[in-house]
Image (tube, rainbow, N blue to C red):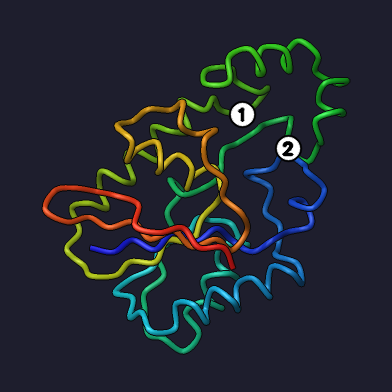
Amino acid sequence: MNLYFVRHGETEYNKSNFYYGKSDVSINEMGFVQAKKACEMLKNVNFNRAYISEMKRTKQTAKIILGEKKCDIIKDCRLNERNFGEFEGKDYDKIKKLYPENWKAFCEDWKDAVPPGGESFTQFYLKVKDFMDNILKINEDNILIVTHSGIIKSVYCYILDNNLDFFWKFSSKNGDITLIKYEYGNMYIDSISHV
């Protein structure tokens, strides 16, 4: 089985370095360019199905990638980016100023600290793990998964024996395509392509 993970195209929030996960924003002009490049790179792949998060930025990206291809698009809340609660829509400096204690805890315990009204990384990761456990039960050749940076980097952790510390060892840029293969009970990262 081939799992093609694609990070959604760029948004204005990406350019501003805001924390945002549950904020439902559209891709910008560069995001459309990135999605079209991903479409070109994946033009010869016949997808059996596609999964996206509930956010419009993943839907927009997936529709561009799929173009005229006939493929069911399935929304899955487990593919939503991490909920940063009251940190959403703010940059680092503003968060440090408005929530100094929460920011300190967030920096000291990145796995288990919970932003006000949000979720911890551990809570977030368990949803990703559940999605991956289920996707491996599907018998398909090619699956497209358009999602977010946090999800993709968490999938890398999943592949690397659920070691969450690997989260910070990878980049995931807007439009990136990661091919993950699952063969004979073994999962591995085959390639990571920048658009």
Residue located at (29% from left, 32% from top)? 161
Q: Residue furthest bottom?
A: 68
Residue 9 vertical position relative to residue 85 in the rendered view, above or below: below
Question: First in sequence: mark 2 or mark 1?
Answer: 2
**Residue 62 point in image, percent of width and height:** 51, 71
Label placed on residue 88: 2
* Quadrant of image for the N terminus: bottom left
The front one of 117 and 169 is 169
Residue located at (49% from left, 77% from top)? 41
**Residue 111 point in image, percent of width and height:** 52, 21
Tell me: 37 left or right of 20. left
Residue located at (60% from left, 20% from top)? 114
Residue 68 vertical position relative to residue 62 in the rendered view, above or below: below
Determine crowd level at label 2: few under 14, some 14-19, many 20+ residues with C-alpha closer than 10 A. Answer: some
Query: Which kind of residue does numbered mark 1 sit on?
Result: Gly
Query: Which kind of residue does numbered mark 2 sit on?
Result: Glu
* CA gap, disc 2 and disc 1: 9 Å
Tell me: 150 left or right of 102. left
**Residue 42 point in image, percent of width and height:** 44, 77
Q: Are marks 2 and 1 in contact (CB under 8 Å)?
A: yes
Determine crowd level at label 1: few under 14, some 14-19, many 20+ residues with C-alpha closer than 10 A. Answer: some
Circle 1 SS class? loop
Residue located at (57% from left, 63% from top)? 194
Residue 3 vertical position relative to residue 92 in the rendered view, above or below: below
Label placed on residue 118: 1
